[in-house]
């Protein structure tokens, strides 16, 4: 029986493509094959969050069907607050209907004018150095780079690009104030665990660009959501810290620039929080990451729940029949030999494994 | 001789957010029976975004279990079945996968038309993101901004009786229409009109080509709750739901085509059809509760009700939406279900901290299953509180017939579904979670589990082949956990509140003395019948009025006859150690047999 679990990428080198898209149509600011930096604006638009509906005909005292003759401004026109939208120039009773806000007239009909209140433009930046491989008209681009990819499980919705530093000496070392030395100023800090909020203020003091953490106590989520910098949890919730595989990837790339995109994990679309570390491209482009494989003997997997959670190992065997897990729940079980461990293999429910790629 | 219509072998699919299940029904010795079921991880989400692969894996597993060929080399279901027993004659499906349907309701009075719209939307995994009504005192542009911000997938318009108000509803719609036009083409909502039919053409004209609009009969043709007609609107919404999902998930069109062109209805709607069918066929009130990875559905079919009461919460799931559920459930409510036997957690984490970490880990790994006993206790605690959170919202809409004088609920049959209940390591744990989560009162004739997720399959099959459904039900596909007697009234902990005597068919007599705050089990094997005599103390109600006893026939189950003396609502000690000890005793009592 084919069992297809989630694949999590802890990939040392791959060709990576990412879409950078506007939420609503706008203007694409770059061209195909163009090289871009992390800060390059690739697309921009205006996103009207507020509108005003003005009853022009009623205020002017004319029937809606006759409004056209009195309009001073028309659909698509920019207007300033206090500027007349329509005017009725009669000797005895001149009247004007004024715009209630700066904005654009998006529609006029049924005697009313709809004004989209001006907002600062929404700009989408590249996020990382890359090449534009595709322009998606009115919405944005597909970027391509070669690099390391680390997928996480939770993000606070922010993103940044900066030099990666790994602090602490172990997989589960907690972030502590004494780790926040001045040499970390302006960097992305990777650390095993975050177990209390007292160190978060220090991140702002040293102007950290981002935080990548193996695991956190889940009650710290509200605090991380308040941060103005990206905070990305790689392995899960609790005190287990990084798995060896993620720690090795981060430690081997310390000192390099990394894009921390701490977007929230949308399991339907597959968008995950991730760290991309652009690397020099070898002569032959590496393969793209693989997704959607079924469990099989020999695969490298990470245990996501219960005994051995966070550990990485290799599948030695897969059961065909339903067996009892330690909890008493019946499930198909995989025999997993943990990496760098002399312990006997563990029996793990298929459902508690993810493929590590 | 002309070909006769064959509908012997039936394959039912259910595509959930986490799991795709397939069930096979066939004719055994002249009658339809449930044969086997299998499941595989769903592939409706990324990276596949196509449900076919999950269906393929589940059907291949079913082939292994049954020894039959159901798919050909091109992964097409073999239809019709052949004389070798391969293939199937009928394919039906239901669907709950996909993100919650962001829904904007528009109506006149909040308590009538908006409530009607909500009742309809509740059958299709809708999350109400905005609502406009006469009770809304925001300015029109504030409503507009709210609607644009909400970015709905669906607009449900309800209001006005037949021949009733038109202008007031139309004014509400003008703002909704402007909001639709401000959304980018391609992401505008589907519109379902279920209001005053006199306004339908004008509404269609207002929205024009910008949206896809459907309509159904007015849900409130005349005033009064008994005049409410929900079924046609729910059926129409099921079609809209299918269309919306077809634009999000690949492979659905092909599945629908194989199933004879019928759209795949929402799983909860199909379940509700079966719950209603069960209620009507046995003349009893039935409550069904399903806790899935993304949502929780609660379906109540009181005796003689014209339509089932459906309450689907797409924000209350045991997987993808577990962390959202935390916002509806205080942490203390979750941890009160943790027993004394909880093993010390890593790093001496507090129960609250460990519970919270569990919920967030479950959210990011929604398919994961309990790996150890602690994990199991956490998962069942969350299951209980998800049920209770749904119940709090659903109960006020239920009729008095299923609400006792204590404001609690009384049902003859309670059915639990979803992996946590259906695959609990001991049936007693499933029974306890149902009693704790739903707190039924009085005499419950049967607690059941939908172990193979058949309610939805049978519900969608019922209109196509009602005889097959009736025959499958005769085979008792839902294992009974047993009857339950749930006492209400107050007493001191440990005080005797009811004497029970069970006389089995072979004449064996078993007795129990139920004390306040405790549970007792009278063993009665699955399918065996017995007579249960109950003699409650004054002021204690076991379903026949305070202090009144009775003798009732009971049918045994995998747990037995459960006597629940914990009161309603279930009373907890304020002392944490005593509370944990009591919870441990409840667990031990139901799972030690």
Image (cartoon, rainbow, N blue to C red):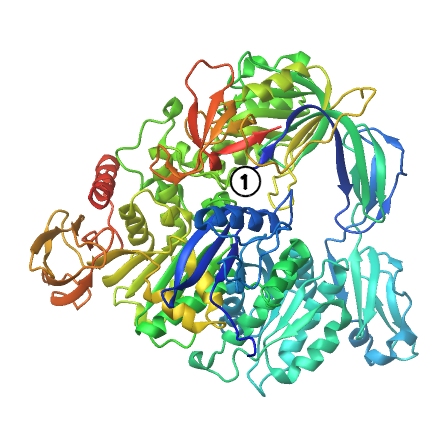
Residue lying at 21% horizontally and 57% vertically, measured from the top left: B556
Residue lying at 34% horizontally and 74% vertically, measured from the top left: B281
Residue lying at 7% horizontally and 56% vertically, measured from the top left: B508
Density class for disc 1 (Cα within 10 Å; few <14, some 14-19, many ≥20) is some
Q: How many marks?
A: 1
Hey, which quadrant is residue A298 in on the image? top right
Instruction: Pinpoint the chain carrying mark 1.
Output: A
Is residue B397 visible in this depiction of the protein?
no
Circle 1: element type:
loop
Name the image quarter holding the C terminus of chain A. top right
Is residue B39 visible in this depiction of the protein?
yes
- Residue A172 versus residue B101 in the image, above or below: above
Residue B180 screen position, x and y as percent: 72, 64
Question: Which residue is at the front of the view, B401 or A210?
Answer: B401
**Image-based side of B560 in relation to B6, left or right:** left
Question: Which residue is at the front of the view, B172 or A328?
Answer: A328
Label 1 sits on residue = A2
Residue B214 screen position, x and y as percent: 65, 73
Residue B82 screen position, x and y as percent: 53, 62
- Residue A298 versus residue A7 in the image, above or below: above
Residue A335 screen position, x and y as percent: 45, 27
Hey, which quadrant is residue A266 in on the image? top right
Question: Which residue is at the front of the view, A124 or A302?
Answer: A302
Residue lying at 57% horizontally and 49% vertically, measured from the top left: B56
**Image-based side of A197 in relation to B528, left or right:** right
């Amino acid at each position: 029986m084919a069992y297809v679990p989630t694949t999590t990428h802890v990939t040392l080198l791959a060709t990576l493509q990412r879409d950078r898209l506007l939420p609503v149509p706008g203007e694409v600011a770059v061209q195909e094959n163009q090289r871009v930096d992390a800060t390059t604006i690739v697309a921009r638009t205006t996103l009207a969050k507020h509108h005003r509906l003005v009853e022009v005909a009623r205020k002017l005292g004319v029937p809606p069907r006759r409004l056209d003759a009195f309009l001073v401004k028309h659909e698509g026109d920019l207007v300033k607050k206090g500027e007349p939208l329509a005017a009725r120039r009669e000797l005895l009773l001149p009247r004007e209907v004024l715009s209630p806000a700066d904005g654009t007239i998006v529609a006029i009909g049924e005697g009313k004018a709809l004004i989209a209140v001006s907002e600062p433009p929404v700009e989408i930046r590249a996020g990382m150095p890359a090449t534009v491989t595709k322009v998606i008209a009115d919405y944005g681009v597909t970027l391509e780079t070669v690099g390391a990819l680390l997928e996480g499980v939770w993000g606070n919705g922010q993103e940044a690009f900066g030099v990666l530093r790994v602090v602490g000496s172990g997989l589960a070392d907690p972030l502590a104030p004494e780790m926040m030395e001045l040499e970390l100023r302006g960097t992305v800090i990777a650390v095993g665990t975050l177990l209390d909020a007292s160190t978060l203020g220090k991140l702002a003091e040293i102007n950290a660009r981002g935080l990548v953490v193996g695991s956190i106590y889940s009650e710290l989520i509200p605090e991380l959501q308040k941060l103005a910098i990206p905070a990305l949890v790689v392995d899960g919730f609790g005190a287990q810290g990084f798995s060896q595989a993620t720690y090795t990837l981060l430690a081997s790339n310390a000192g390099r620039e990394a894009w921390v995109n701490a977007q929230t994990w949308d399991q339907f679309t597959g968008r995950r929080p991730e760290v991309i570390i652009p690397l020099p491209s070898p002569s032959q482009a590496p393969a793209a990451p693989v997704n959607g494989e079924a469990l099989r003997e020999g695969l490298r997997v990470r245990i996501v729940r219960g005994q051995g959670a966070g550990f990485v190992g290799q599948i030695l065997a897969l059961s065909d029949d339903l067996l009892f897990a330690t909890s008493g729940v019946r499930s198909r079980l995989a025999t997993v030999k943990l990496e760098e461990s002399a312990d006997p293999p563990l029996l793990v429910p298929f459902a508690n494994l993810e493929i590590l790629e | 001789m002309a070909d006769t219509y064959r509908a012997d072998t039936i394959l039912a699919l259910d595509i959930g957010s986490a799991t795709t299940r397939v069930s096979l029904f066939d004719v055994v010795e002249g009658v339809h029976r449930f044969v086997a079921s299998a499941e595989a991880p769903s592939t409706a989400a990324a990276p596949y975004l196509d449900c076919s692969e999950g269906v393929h894996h589940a059907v291949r597993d079913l082939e292994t279990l049954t020894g039959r060929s159901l798919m050909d080399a091109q992964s097409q279901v073999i239809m019709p079945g052949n004389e070798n027993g391969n293939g199937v004659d009928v394919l039906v499906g239901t669907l709950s996968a996909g993100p919650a349907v962001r829904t904007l309701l528009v109506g006149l009075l909040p308590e009538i038309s908006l409530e009607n719209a909500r009742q309809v939307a509740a059958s299709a995994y809708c999350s109400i993101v905005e609502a406009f009504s006469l009770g809304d005192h925001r300015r029109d542009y504030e409503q507009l901004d709210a609607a644009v911000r909400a970015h709905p997938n669906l607009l449900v318009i309800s209001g006005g009786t037949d021949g009733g108000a038109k202008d007031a509803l139309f004014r509400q719609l003008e703002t909704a229409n402007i909001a639709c036009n401000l959304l980018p083409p391609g992401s505008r909502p589907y519109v379902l009109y279920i209001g005053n039919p006199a306004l339908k053409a004008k509404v269609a004209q207002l929205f024009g080509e910008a949206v896809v609009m459907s309509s159904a009969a007015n849900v409130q043709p005349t005033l009064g709750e008994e005049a409410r007609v929900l079924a046609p609107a729910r059926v129409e919404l099921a079609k809209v739901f299918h269309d919306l999902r077809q634009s999000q998930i690949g492979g659905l069109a092909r599945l629908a085509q194989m199933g004879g062109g019928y759209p795949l209805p929402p799983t909860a709607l199909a379940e509700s059809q079966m719950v209603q069918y069960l209620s009507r066929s046995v003349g009893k009130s039935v409550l069904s509760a399903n806790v899935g990875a993304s949502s929780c559905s609660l379906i109540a079919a009181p005796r003689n009700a014209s339509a089932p009461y459906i309450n689907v919460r797409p924000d209350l799931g045991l997987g993808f939406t577990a962390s959202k559920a935390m916002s509806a459930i205080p942490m203390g409510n979750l941890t009160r279900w943790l027993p004394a036997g909880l093993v010390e957690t890593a790093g001496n984490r507090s129960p609250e901290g460990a519970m919270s970490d569990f919920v967030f880990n479950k959210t990011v790994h929604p398919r994961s299953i309990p790996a150890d006993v602690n994990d199991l206790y956490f998962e069942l605690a969350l299951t209980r509180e998800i049920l209770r959170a749904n119940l709090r919202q659903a109960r006020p809409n239920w009729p008095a017939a299923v609400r006792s004088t204590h404001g609690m609920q009384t049902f003859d049959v309670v059915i639990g579904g979803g992996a946590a209940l259906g695959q609990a390591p001991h049936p007693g744990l499933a029974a306890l979670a149902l009693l704790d989560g739903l707190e039924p009162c009085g005499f419950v004739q049967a607690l059941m589990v939908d172990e193979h997720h058949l309610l939805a399959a049978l519900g969608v099959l019922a209109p196509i082949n009602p005889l097959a459904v009736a025959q499958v039900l005769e085979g008792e596909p839902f294992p009974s956990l047993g009857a339950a007697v749930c006492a209400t009234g107050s007493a001191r902990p440990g005080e005797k509140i009811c004497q029970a005597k069970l006389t089995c068919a072979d004449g064996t007599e078993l007795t129990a003395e139920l004390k306040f705050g405790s549970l007792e089990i009278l063993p009665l094997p699955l399918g065996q019948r017995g007579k249960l005599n109950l003699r409650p103390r004054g002021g204690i109600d076991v379903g026949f009025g305070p202090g009144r006893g009775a003798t009732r026939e009971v049918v045994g189950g995998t747990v037995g006859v459960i006597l629940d003396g914990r009161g309603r609502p279930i009373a907890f000690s304020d002392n944490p150690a005593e509370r944990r000890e009591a919870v441990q005793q409840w667990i031990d009592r139901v799972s030690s047999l």
